[in-house]
Amino acid sequence: MQTLEKYPKEYRYDVAMLRTAVTWALMSKCNRKKVGAVIASPDYRILAHGINGAPSGFENDVCEENGKTLDHVIHAEMNAIIYAAKRGIAIDGCSIYLTLSPCKKCSASILQSGIKRVCYMEDYRDSGIDFLKEHGVEVVKMTTFHVFEPFKTESLEKVFDLFRKE
Ligand SMILES: [Zn+2]
């Protein structure tokens, strides 16, 4: 089993955060696209996470009707930012990790929130990545290879191998 020890700390921590974002994305009830977001402090502590979906407590918490995304569906990055606001967690100067690049609307909100770094894996068609770069936000597109490597296993025993020293 491959570990990431030979890679720089920043890269290893970015991979860990994206794996967390992937884990949360899988919790989304949206069918067209499941998206996960994690906001982390500059010293790599998770402050908030979010997935795309209806506001909490919605009885009918589906995301789509007749193949169209419903208006009340909140994007993953906005859910993470809103959670931080709700709990009084400062995210100025932080990083956000996304399974999918942010849309133009969310990119403006990310900029306004003071987030300084966006790390993502997959490109969204209506991406605001260029906008973020133009306004001084560091943008990093991560290869999915190391993010998914531990999940490419057929047996539970092999998953547990991840927690053992090689
Ligand atoms: Zn968005």
Image (spheres, helix red, strand yellow):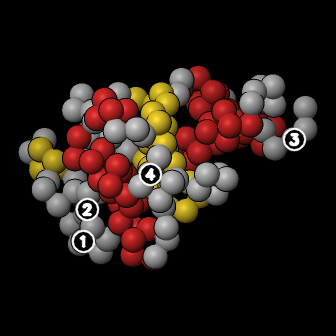
Q: Residue at point 59% right, 30% down?
A: 148
Identify which amino acid the numbered label 2 is placed on.
Ala
Are the residues flagged by discs 2 and 4 in contact, CB closer than 8 Å?
A: no
Q: CA distance from mark 2 to mark 4?
A: 24 Å
Give the secondary structure at mark 1. Answer: loop
Counting from the top left corner in percent of width and height, residue 67 is at 13, 41
Q: Earlier in the sequence, mark 3 or mark 1?
A: 1
Q: Earlier in the sequence, mark 4 or mark 1?
A: 1
Q: Earlier in the sequence, mark 2 or mark 3?
A: 2
Counting from the top left corner in percent of width and height, residue 80 is at 41, 59
Q: Is residue 144 left or right of residue 123?
A: right
The quadrant the C terminus occupies is top right
Identify which amino acid the numbered label 4 is placed on.
Ile
Q: Which residue is mark 4?
A: 115
Give neighbour class at mark 4: few <14, some 14-19, many 20+ (Cα, 10 Å).
Answer: many
Counting from the top left corner in percent of width and height, residue 16 is at 64, 42
Q: Earlier in the sequence, mark 4 or mark 3?
A: 4
Identify which amino acid the numbered label 1 is placed on.
Phe
Give neighbour class at mark 1: few <14, some 14-19, many 20+ (Cα, 10 Å).
Answer: few
Q: CA distance from mark 4 to mark 1?
A: 29 Å
Q: Is residue 20 left or right of residue 64?
A: right
Q: Which residue is mark 3?
A: 164
The quadrant the N terminus occupies is top right
Give the secondary structure at mark 2. Answer: loop
Are the residues flagged by discs 3 and 1 in contact, CB closer than 8 Å?
A: no
Q: Which residue is mark 1?
A: 58
Residue 54 - label = 2
Give neighbour class at mark 3: few <14, some 14-19, many 20+ (Cα, 10 Å).
Answer: few
Q: CA distance from mark 2 to mark 1?
A: 7 Å
Seen in the picture, residue 68 relative to 89 is either above or below; the reply is above
Q: CA distance from mark 3 to mark 1?
A: 41 Å
Q: Residue at point 33% right, 32% down?
A: 134
